[in-house]
Amino acid sequence: MKIGPYQLTNNLILAPMAGVTDRPFRQLCKNLGAGMAVSEMVTCNSLLWGSEKTKRRANHEGETEPKSVQIAGADPAMMAKAAKHNADHGAQIIDINMGCPAKKICNVMSGSALLQNETLVKEILEAVVAAVDIPVTLKIRTGWDKENRNALNIAKIAEESGIQALAMHGRTRACHYRGNAEYDTIAEVKQKISIPMIANGDITTPEKAKFVLEYTNADAVMIGRAAQGRPWIFREIQHYLETGEHLAEPRPTEVRDILLGHLDNLYAFYGEFTGVRIARKHISWYSKGHSHGAAFRDAVNRVETIEQQLEMTQQFFNNLNPSEELAA
């Protein structure tokens, strides 16, 4: 799959997730088989660009290309300015968020709330595309609610506005993450547009990825929550798509080594105080499904230092049965 001048190594993409897809996690997923990884959502509010949080979200030092940054907002001029700002600071692809269902985003008419206003969607897309000389992509949902599925209209507006790839989560904003993803809607939109289509929603296994690619005829799949604590899901899917066979589950020692490397990168990126706290959710995800995982999580989430967190994590995985299979 190609986005602008960027030929992706495969058609497996890490979805943008607030509080999750920071630079350490993006690079880890790329190392383990993701063809592209999209950043956490960056605000279009220029008053916040100098904050440490926003600067970290836009930090791509040492990251494998292409570097995709997601921006969010509801004002065309501010969105254009945000796109240019991020392009000037290393972004190679700008992704526009019109898919986030969170209340704090929708209450200010950003994210998936924009799907209610097709005129404003067009104004934002045209403004952002005109502001930068790098590819612009768009992420949407199938509509605002089940009575207002306008994904096809939005997709056509996107194509006409110069958007170079469209990612669609197969639920409406009202559905949040409840129910099952609507692959029929993704398939219908794919038939009607000529830009690359990326299917998203409930892709949790290699079999599901293969099914969604074949059913929707999408050019790529986007994986989000299924990569939390299982960043190797990308290599598993790639292997299955290429061979029809499953890779063996990583042994506890490999999971340990992947996690410890991830933690080291988090500490280096955030520093001790924030790094230890950011690491807690990742440690919880990695340990899910393992024997005595609940007791371990309860204990490790109480420690405050890098040394304690690393020691407890290493000890937990060292004590696992080498033949133990990781529960899904």
Image: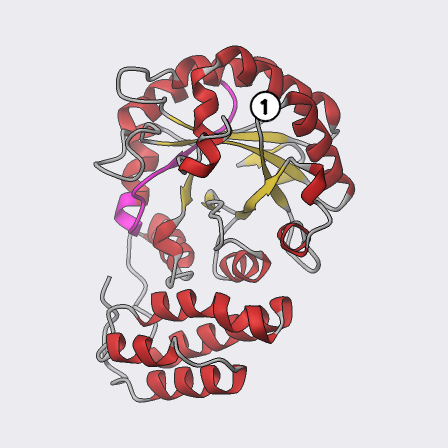
Residue at 45 percent of width and 31 percent of height: 106
Compared across the picture, whether 109 is left or right of 230 comes to right
Residue at 67 percent of width and 56 percent of height: 52
Residue at 49 percent of width and 13 percent of height: 118
Residue 47: quarter of image:
top right
Residue 178: quarter of image:
top left
Q: Which range is magenta?
A: 193-208
Eyeballing the image, is 291 above or below 33?
below
Compared across the picture, whether 120 is left or right of 325 comes to right
Q: Nearer the viewer, residue 185 or 34?
A: 185
Q: Nearer the viewer, residue 32 or 56?
A: 56
Residue at 32 percent of width and 72 percent of height: 287
The verdict on residue 67 being magenta is no
Residue wearing tag 1: 163
Amino acid carrying label 1: it is Ile
Eyeballing the image, is 256 above or below 3?
below
- Quarter of the rendering occupied by the C terminus: bottom left
The reply to whether residue 142 is in sight is yes
Give the x, y percent position of residue 310.
47, 83
Which element is circle 1 on?
loop
